[in-house]
Amino acid sequence: MSAGAISPSILDVSNLTVRIDGQLLLSDVSLSVARGTLHAIVGPNGAGKSTLVYAVLGQIPFEGRILAHWRRNGRIGYVPQSFSVDRTLPVTVEDFLALTRQNRPVCFGVGRAAARRIAAMLDRVGLAGFEQRQLSVLSGGELRRVLLAHALDPLPELLILDEPATGLDQTASQWLEDVLLAARDRDDVTVLMVSHDHERVKRHGDRVTVLDRCVVADGAPADALA
Ligand code: ADP
Ligand code: MG
């Protein structure tokens, strides 16, 4: 990805094709993500949704062009579809978040400023008081929230989430929705989200791309998901 000229879009994907071991995972995919929007990617299992995300993140080779147009910090926040923690890894939620939020090594303790910042980050994602929990004991949904807290601080220009609602109950899904809408509407974060929840996407999404190795539909949620 590279910086571009002033553009209403934050991300332009053009003619993206991904082949791995001779298998065609994505074929000629083009889409634009408009700045300040919530853009959903939907599609069946194996459609190439995560592959698209990996290409955007620069993690796999591809043909075609992916251009980002940054205006602020050029930061991408990313919450992966799955993230497993070694059960024997002795690290607390606070230590994990402090690793990239203070200059002194975390093995010498978490400083007061970092601790305050981490408390605010956890509060934002509904995990107030989770500082001293071991990362390894968190449920999948809680772990994803910790990763979301990490992704939202410092505020990114583009937040990419890969099926963030998986494993969340009704309350947690509502909470997730509130956090994402606040990021978009209050903090001017563009949200690109892989989702299976068509109803929520119709309610709050600005645009949807339906993917099944190629782009099947792209447009306003009510139209694209019809
Ligand atoms: P989705 O996220 O839409 O469920 P993925 O992007 O994870 O789908 O995967 C798309 C297809 O590519 C799947 O059929 C998957 O098995 C295959 N795939 C993913 N990664 C690899 C890889 N490294 N090598 C070969 N095939 C892969
Ligand atoms: Mg996936």
Image (spheres, helix red, strand yellow):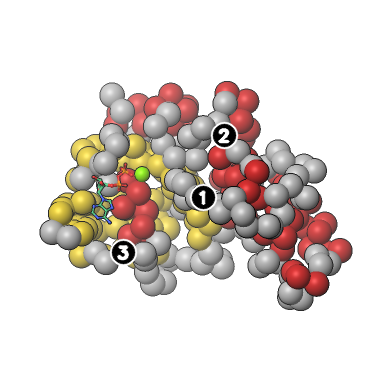
Q: CA distance from mark 1 to mark 3?
A: 20 Å
Quadrant occupied by the C terminus: top left
* Mark 3 lies on residue: 60
Q: Which mark is residue 84?
A: 1
Closer-to-camera residue (185/60) = 60
Q: Residue at x 41, y 36 (%)?
A: 195
Mark 3 Cβ and ligand 1 under 8 Å apart: yes
* Mark 2 lies on residue: 177
Residue 178, x across and y down, in percent? 61, 35
| Amino acid on which the number 3 mark rests in the picture | Ile
Q: CA distance from mark 3 to mark 2?
A: 29 Å
In which quarter of the view is residue 68 placed? bottom left
Q: Is residue 214 left or right of residue 8?
A: left
Residue 28, x across and y down, in percent? 17, 54
3 or 2: mark nearer the eye? 3
Q: Residue at x 25, y 41 (%)?
A: 47
